[in-house]
Image: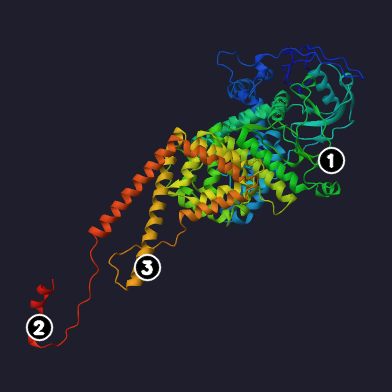
Amino acid sequence: MTKTVTPNPLKRTDLEAEIRPHDSAQSRQLPTQSSEPTPLEQTAEPAAESLTSIEKSAVKVPSSVPLPQSLADILVYDPDAIAAYYRRRPFQIVFRLAEILWLFAGYGLQLLWDRQFKQQAINARKRAARLREILTQLGPAYIKVGQALSTRPDLVSPLVMEELVKLQDQLPPFSNEIAFRFIEEELGQPPAKIYASLSPNPIAAASLGQVYKGQLKSGEAVAVKVQRPGLAQQITRDIVILRWIAEWATNNVSQVRSDLVSIMDEFGARIFEEIDYNHEGENAERFADLYGYLPEVIVPHIYPEFTNRRVLTMEWIEGTKLTNLDALEAQGIDATHVIEVGVKCSLRQLLEHGFFHADPHPGNLLVTAEGKLAYLDFGMMCEVQPYQRYGLIEAIVHMVNRDFDGLARDYIKLEFLTPETDLTPIIPALAGVFNNALGASVAELNLKSITDEFSELMYEYPFRVPAYYALIIRSLVTLDGIAISVDPEFKVLSKAYPYVARRLLTDPAPELRASLQELLFEEGGFRWNRLENLLKNARNSDEYDLDKVLNQTVDFLFSERGEFIRVRVADELVKELDKLGYGLIQRLYRQVQLNGRTEPTIAFQAQSNQPSNWEHVVRILGILRDTEGFDASTLAALLPQIVAKPETRDLGRRIVSGLAQRAAARMIREFLLARPPATPPLKAVPAAPSAVATRPAALPSAM
């Protein structure tokens, strides 16, 4: 977005407009509107405007900066600056605190009554519903807090979480007079000079703003979002109170294991981004750059010249809510397919680029007449760092393969557990929880079952939920709820695992290469079943390229980083060839025994009933052959390249040396050190004394 930032000269006399926009459109040259589109003259954007929403959330006002005289001076979230502002206005905090205490006092008395008369279990659901009503009554900040708590199993019980998920932020609209005044103050001209038309009433109203349908002078249909009056004052005042409560609870309530102050700061940063529509516009443009190329995904265009802190102008998307199944069916649209598109896009957001839409509720997802999925409302976005993305992939793979030791270590990497946490009691608890929730196969993975089971576990053990994960689980649970409403048999995780398997097999990132190595090699052996599982699931991913997998495998195997795996592969081949040769000798020896009717003199080991490595190899070759895009000529072309590599000769020498050592060790063990089989004693036969006496003399002569 390109625009000039200057102070706004308009005088504010209304209490509702307590934040001045830091980007005044009056000082900008707006394009002359006419029936014919005209080119827009755009000026350079200052460095501060180029900051992403994530970077801005980390910006803090230096201590040397003067105390803020108004909320307009606080453009990004700074808890110290906000607290300093309200220290000089204590009565605003006192009156708001009295209102909050009045509502929660009655709720607290109800909880005490239940506890006194042992009614907690009976009234638990009723009390959770009452909490939801109180948060709704307290306004936008508390609605957002409640929505955040609905994904925090470390802070509230599963029953309360279930009730808070129902929180809605729909509120009655405010007057057009205020909305149109805000448009003029933010964009520098009355709405009639900017838009050819605006709907007489808002078409939607929520806790942060309301939306009008309009048309630009140049003819494009647009959605115009205008922020609710008094929002900044309400939110900052409540943030101060909530942060004080969080600090007190963290320091004085032993049951609180998470850093509530950090959680509140994360919440404050996010909500400050949401109430700055410049950020939302930047988020939408970045989202379009990352995911707009997907053929079945639509991201609305942002009009930055008609966007400011409290007004957002974006392309109007005509569509049907994803949950309106009758309307979709009447248009001949397969809603289940659209859900699959949403799942695939969400996976790219979360695990590929790390910039994801954290609020995909039904109102923010529309299906166009062409059956494409359109994303709306980019106020709540979150960024996941690379190490977190890789950690999530590893955790999913460990969970599916029931590697609970690895899963417990993943939770330390992902900051759910501290490094000094004793994992001894947690590993069996994870096994107990996830063995129940996982089902018999990947196809049975149920996100709700897993999150419900995990929520109970986190409530009992010293888990803490990182702020980024709270938004991730909120996004996934919301998407899962939509999917189930469309198709009760739809399972988000089972659809997601092929993508995860493909990433683990094809992503060259060192973290995932190490994770794949750890997954496949365990306790001195190769886990063939895990490789089979990955290959079977990865082939169901749309972008699975088998040729790429084979080439990457060869390149990695014969690289310096692949030396460990080459050694393990060589050792596995030595064991398998030795077993094959030993089995052949056994069969030949038994045949000789049958022909000669002789007693065995060598005690061969019993054969294992476990499938041999060759059988696993045959099964894997079958999986590769059945994979779409498999070409035997590609595999044949790789063989000469492999044979010509110097590492292959080293492998051959290692294999020959290993076979020789095993053969020598077996010869020593079974021929030189083995005891001959015991011969049963002969039965005593009565004989003449002379015969007995002459027998010893006959032995030397026979020799």
**Secondary structure category for the residue under label 1:** loop
Q: Pointer 1: what residue?
A: 369
Circle 3 Cα neighbour tier, 10 Å, few/some/many (<14 / 14–19 / ≥20): few
- Please name whichever residue, 442 or 230, is drawn nearer the observer in this view of the structure: 442
Dot 3 corresponds to which residue?
Answer: 591
Q: Name the residue type under label 2.
A: Val
Instruction: Please name the residue shown 27% across and 59% down the image.
Output: 670
Which residue, as the protein is rendered here, is positioned at the far right? Answer: 35
Q: Is residue 7 above or below residue 649?
A: above
Q: Residue at x 55, y 16 (%)?
A: 63
What secondary structure is found at the residue carrying circle 2? helix
Frontmost of labels 2 and 1 is 2
Question: Could you tell me the amino acid type at mark 1?
Answer: Ala
> Compared with residue 181, is residue 296 higher up or lower down, i.e. above or below?
below
Q: CA distance from mark 3 to mark 2?
A: 39 Å
- Residue receiving disc 2: 692
Q: Nearer the viewer, residue 504 or 576?
A: 576
Residue found at x 34% / y 68%:
592
Q: Which mark is residue 384?
A: none
Disc 3 marks a residue whose amino acid type is: Gln
Rendering coords of residue 349 (x, y %): 65, 35
